[in-house]
Amino acid sequence: MKRRAFIRAATLTAAVIATPVLRAARARIVIVGGGFGGSACALLLKHAQPSLDVTLVDPDARYVTCPLSNDVIVGARSIDSLTLTRAGLARAGVRFVRARATALDAEARSIRLDDGTRLAYDRCIVAPGIRFLWGTPEDYDEAAAETMPHAWEAGTQTTRLADRLRAMPDGGTFAISVPSGLMRCPPAPYERASLVAEYLARHKPRSKVLIFDANNRFPRQEAFTTAWDTLYRGRIEWIPVTEGGAVERVGARTNTLHTASGAHRVAVANVIPPQAPGQFALDAGLASGHGWCPVDPATFASTRVPHVHVIGDACIADAMPKAASAALSQARQCAAAIVASLAGREPPPPALDSVCYSALALDRAFAIRLRFRVANGHVEAEPNASEADSTPSVAEREAAARWYRSIRAAAFAA
């Protein structure tokens, strides 16, 4: 009887080993893009299923975070304080490949790198961030960005804009050009205007900020403008598109912005170009006709390419903002859905959220906290989602610092 029981147990064990669940434990996951979304997803997958073979591909050995980069522009923190390595991912068992992904072969399920190497995958997660649509405004290209920094990808551009601000003469104008259309972190240009205005009040009191806006409204406009009137009366001027605010052309050599209202020569021009998904998403056929990448919001699986998921700024997430907190939330849902799928289970119900902190000064901020639900295949904000009081406070600025430390830990184990 003991022998027969042993044989039955051995047979059952062999059957279990052959199940898709245990084979899935050794599945190969390749993640393209090592920002907040891609890096967080890598860590979440390894935490949920340590035996997964998780590879993260990115051309940069270090990542400079966009959150809090406006503080660098006004000299409140160093760029080094925002610079993260991949060491935390390596400690977690994620393999980091420093390379640029150049092509996706959906049929072979492989990613080609710029050195010719191919990485096979069972599931691929694409988190390529954004690319800039150079040439809009007219004559704004990569060369012009040397003189008129966008500082919309943190790093060299951030420090370049900081240098321009420090060097501008008292009495000069700091101009920000805001594009129309979907963009990364929509409130950030207005946070930048706030912090620059505070810097000018202290160091160049005869200077001002002009915001040339290709939009008629902007996020939490009332909260921003009330704070501006209280803190920086007369120092920030917002010019909407209806009043000639859209910059149509730039003159980089003379630091001139051309709008429907005429030519505006300024001391510092911060030109933020319109944006689209990272080039890899476009080349891989993940983007739709209107530019961004459609996904199933319950799993963030691409609706265009099988066995591929898209998270972060590049995906279409409807009501969710293109922000680090949203990318982290999408990474959680995507990782959970992949682990469930590999185990032959249904994905968990979506639980999506975001929080965006906007600094009105170095010592005060307000927050936008939202929760989202999936209804009829779309992500929409929950009607009872909680939002903090839009009055800027010291407590929210301190909360922003704590939040920043938490997202660094969640995405980079740093």
Image (spheres, rainbow, N blue to C red):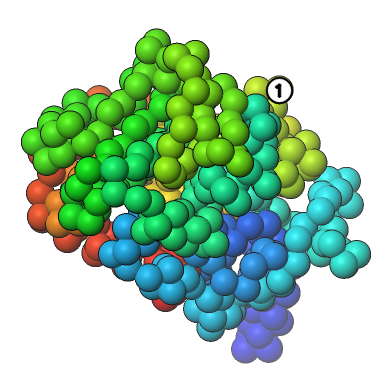
Vertical placement of residue 241 versus 5, above or below:
above
Q: Residue 1's spot in the image, x, y percent?
A: 63, 86
Q: Residue 309's spot in the image, x, y percent?
A: 64, 46
Apparent side of residue 222 relative to residue 211 in the rendered image (left or right): left
**Mark 1 highlights which residue?**
289
Q: Residue 189's spot in the image, x, y percent?
A: 38, 39
Q: Residue furthest toward the bottom?
A: 2
Q: Residue at x 56, y 75 (%)?
A: 86
On the question of residue 168 being in view, the answer is yes
Q: Residue 57's spot in the image, x, y percent?
A: 69, 64
Q: Residue at x 32, y 58 (%)?
A: 74
Q: Residue at x 20, y 47 (%)?
A: 205
**Which amino acid, mark 1?**
Gly
Apparent side of residue 288 relative to residue 257 in the rendered image (left or right): right
Q: Secondary structure at mark 1?
A: loop
Determine the image quadrant of residue 233.
top left
Q: Residue at x 52, y 39 (%)?
A: 255
Vertical placement of residue 55 versus 306, above or below:
below
Determine the image quadrant of residue 305.
top right
On the question of residue 121 being in view, the answer is no
User: What is the tally of numbered marks visible in this picture?
Assistant: 1
Q: Nearer the viewer, residue 11 or 77?
A: 77
Vertical placement of residue 152 versus 21, above or below:
above
Apparent side of residue 116 relative to residue 85 in the rendered image (left or right): right
Q: Nearer the viewer, residue 336 or 224?
A: 224
Q: Nearer the viewer, residue 103 or 2?
A: 103
